[in-house]
Amino acid sequence: MFAKLKRTVGLDPAKILATPLPALANIIADGGMLALHRAEKLHAAAEIALEVAGGPAGLRRLVRRDPLEARKVLRRFPGIGEPGADKVLLFAKSRRTLAPDSNVLRVLVRIGYGTESGNYQRMYRSAAIAVQAELPADFAWLIAAHQLLRRHGQELCKRAAPRCDACPLSAGCRWYLANR
């Protein structure tokens, strides 16, 4: 889907906006359900990109120059919350974070970083704050740690059926020790 969009329309926000929604939906139809709804989100993202930074180049400059302001701007895009904005900034090597998506967050909280909560945003912030002081300035390390923790959460530290018996962290895992 992405390659087809890039080939037929291009990735320039102005070109995306100039493409009628039905045509855009047809181009991205292979990417999943509700193609017209996803096309509307693409139009909205293109409008935001042009409005806030004059396009992708301006957004890249903002990410490098002012990560905290960039985080606010990124959160304006459809489907981008705190974890998504933090992930963009991590992979752009602009902000020291583990960008904990739901899998990373679950692992961090279970091993003792942050507080379990029914409120995802509160739990996200508590884990991000709790781990922040221990994060190195090495972006390659942070990206690798994010990917490793994500995979750990997907394969071992699952929400419904964690595989603690296979987990190399279980001896020091707060959640395991409380639930075994």
Image (tube, rainbow, N blue to C red):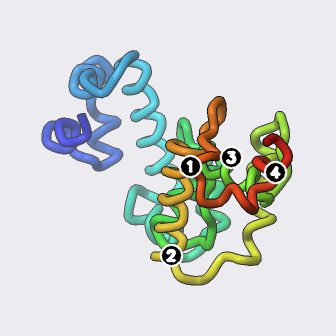
Identified at 19% across, 42% down, the residue is: 3
Identified at 24% across, 24% down, the residue is: 30
Query: In this rendering, does residue 74 appear at all?
Result: no
Disc sitting over residue 141 in the figure: 2
Pointers 3 and 4 in contact (C-beta within 8 Å): no
Image-quadrant location for residue 96 = bottom right
Q: Amino acid at mark 3?
A: Arg
Q: Residues within 10 Å of mark 3 (few under 14, many from 20)?
A: many
Q: Could you tell me which secondary element the residue under label 1 belongs to?
A: helix
Per the model, the C-alpha gap separating discs 2 and 1 is 24 Å
* Residue that label 3 marks: 106
Q: Position of 91 compared to 124: left or right?
A: left
Q: Could you tell me which secondary element the residue under label 4 belongs to?
A: helix
| x and y percentages locating residue 9 in the rendered image | 20, 39
**Nearer-the-camera pick, 72 or 156:** 156
Pointers 2 and 4 in contact (C-beta within 8 Å): no
Per the model, the C-alpha gap separating discs 3 and 1 is 17 Å
Of callouts 4 and 1, the N-terminal one: 1
Q: Amino acid at mark 1?
A: Ala
| x and y percentages locating residue 180 in the rendered image | 79, 42
* Residue that label 1 marks: 166
| x and y percentages locating residue 82 in the rendered image | 66, 50
Q: Could you tell me which secondary element the residue under label 2 belongs to?
A: helix
